[in-house]
Amino acid sequence: MTAEKTVYIKTYGCQMNVYDSDRMSDSLAPLGYRQTDVIEAADLIILNTCHIREKAAEKVYSELGRIRQVKAERRAAGQATMVAVAGCVAQAEGEEIIRRAPVVDMVFGPQAYHRLPDLIDRAARGERPSDLAEAAAPFKTAAPAKVVATDFPIEDKFDSLPPVSAERTRSRGVTAFLTVQEGCDKFCTFCVVPYTRGAEVSRPAGKVLAEARALVAAGVREVTLLGQNVNAYHGEGEDGDDWTLARLIRALARIPGLDRLRYTTSHPRDMGEDLIGAHRDLPQLMPYLHLPVQSGSDRILAAMNRRHTADDYLRLVERIRAARPDIALSGDFIVGFPGETDADFEATLALVRAVGYAGCFTFKYSPRPGTPASDLDGQVPETVKTERLHRLQALIDDQERRFAAGLVGRTLPVLLEKAGRLPGQLVGRSPYLHPVHVTAPAGLIGSIAPVAITSTGRHSLNGDVVPSDGAEPGASPAVRLSA
Ligand code: SAH
Ligand code: SF4
Ligand code: F3S
């Protein structure tokens, strides 16, 4: 019998980190670790970190300050605490973390977390963190400025992790993430991901299908396929051919009980005709697409190395809407990229008006050490970035409100996921990814219920479960926004 211990995991950044944190937790279960939400009660604290913007990285250091106190208090009470930094900050700044925060016992990058049990064992035996960082990283952690491995064996990690466990999946609910592709070869000039996650690698289709079947057997009804460039997926198929994401999705859609599929994040250049066709043909594929464009100015797009123009993007959006007219589009935008003029920013506003989004994420450009754009002339003053961010956000907020308002009065199939904050309330997701609040018995959790939408919240919808078979069949009428 292993003695019961507790692990506290704090996750920053993107959905892939959420997936990774769950898998870390799974790999610790055989060692007797149970997950806790109370940091003071944890024998092992893991920060699964994000390096995408300066603020994200800085949060880690302030959290480590708090953890220093927790560790000291536990020590005074005679309890040992092990502290690990995982994820993208660990990959990019491994040795700096150890230097700045001696409280840290272990540092490991996104490609090394399957070795966690071994690392814990070694840390417990008193090995120094710098030795461990060396052992855990697939490539040197201290080189954020350049890619030092172009091909690292992602499947080593996935193969070494325990398979998804039915019991643990059940406790996590009816929706799940599933990583199918990791890393990025695009090298947008602002972005750290190719350095922190390494080169693009796709998992073989058979392994993805097996993991999806295990999730469904444990009660999952909706799976979101993850990849930094998920639509560039080209994994080995069950027939030995290279499969595209569309082929993988078509195979997943044949799994009985897997009612809903989503994927994120896509790059406009990899949005193939077959994937667009899947949105037309497959009712399981939800009408929601996160398709970041970053800017509406061709000059800035070229400086970002996006390798498409604003017009390419608009024509792509037209083709996607021709296949699935009601699709909810979202995106990411960066304001204040080096050299961005008022005219460039106006071009971004014009693109947003032309597309009509259901919602978007907007960011101020944050120079990242080692990325090409951080050295460019023409860095934009903070005040200008703030002003542009507010203007862009106001336009997007308006589009988001209109999209949501267009759903009021309609009946949507809602996957009810969990209890809401109010008594008797449940929260689910619309096909378009809005949280939907209804008053309904807890027994409906896990079902897809027809919900008549009655009103909108800030980023959500409210509605009533329709008792009979009120759900709209098939494709719904076009919700097309333009300002
Ligand atoms: N692989 C995804 C996600 C990348 S990170 C993609 O290609 O879209 C998510 C978003 O963060 C990016 O789309 C971009 O809008 C933003 N981002 C990345 N680097 C940034 C930086 N240095 N400053 C500000 N925003 C950034
Ligand atoms: Fe970063 Fe660009 Fe790759 Fe997205 S496509 S992860 S923004 S380098
Ligand atoms: Fe952040 Fe790494 Fe994801 S930098 S956005 S956690 S890939």
Image: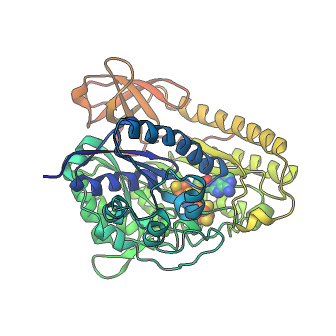
Instruction: Tell me where residue 270 appears, x and y as whole percent.
Output: 54, 68
Residue farthest to the top, as pictured: 423
Between 326 and 264, the residue placed more toward the observer is 264
What is the total number of numbered labels drawn onto the structure image?
Answer: 0
Does 398 sit above or below residue 84?
A: above
Q: On the rendering, which quadrant does ligand 2 occupy?
A: bottom right
Q: Can residue 109 be seen in this view?
A: no
Residue farthest to the bottom, as pictured: 240
Instruction: Tell me where residue 244 appears, x and y as whole percent.
Output: 42, 71
Between 416 and 310, the residue placed more toward the observer is 416
* Residue drawn 71% across the image and 53% down it: 366
Instruction: Tell me where residue 306 appears, x and y as whole percent.
Output: 68, 66
Between 18 and 307, the residue placed more toward the observer is 18
Between 137 and 364, the residue placed more toward the observer is 137
Q: Can residue 289 be seen in this view?
A: yes
Does 432 sit above or below residue 314?
A: above
Does 411 sit above or below residue 439?
A: below
- In the picture provided, is 56 more to the left or to the right than 138? right
Q: Quadrant of residue 394?
A: top right
- Colouring mode (rainbow / by chain / secondary structure / one colour): rainbow
- In the picture provided, is 55 more to the left or to the right than 203? right
Residue farthest to the left, as pictured: 1
Q: Quadrant of residue 255?
A: bottom left
Q: If the image is split into quadrants, where does the C terminus sit?
A: top right
Instruction: Tell me where residue 347 appears, x and y as whole percent.
Output: 79, 52
* Residue drawn 84% across the image and 52% down it: 380
* Residue drawn 69% across the image and 47% down it: 352
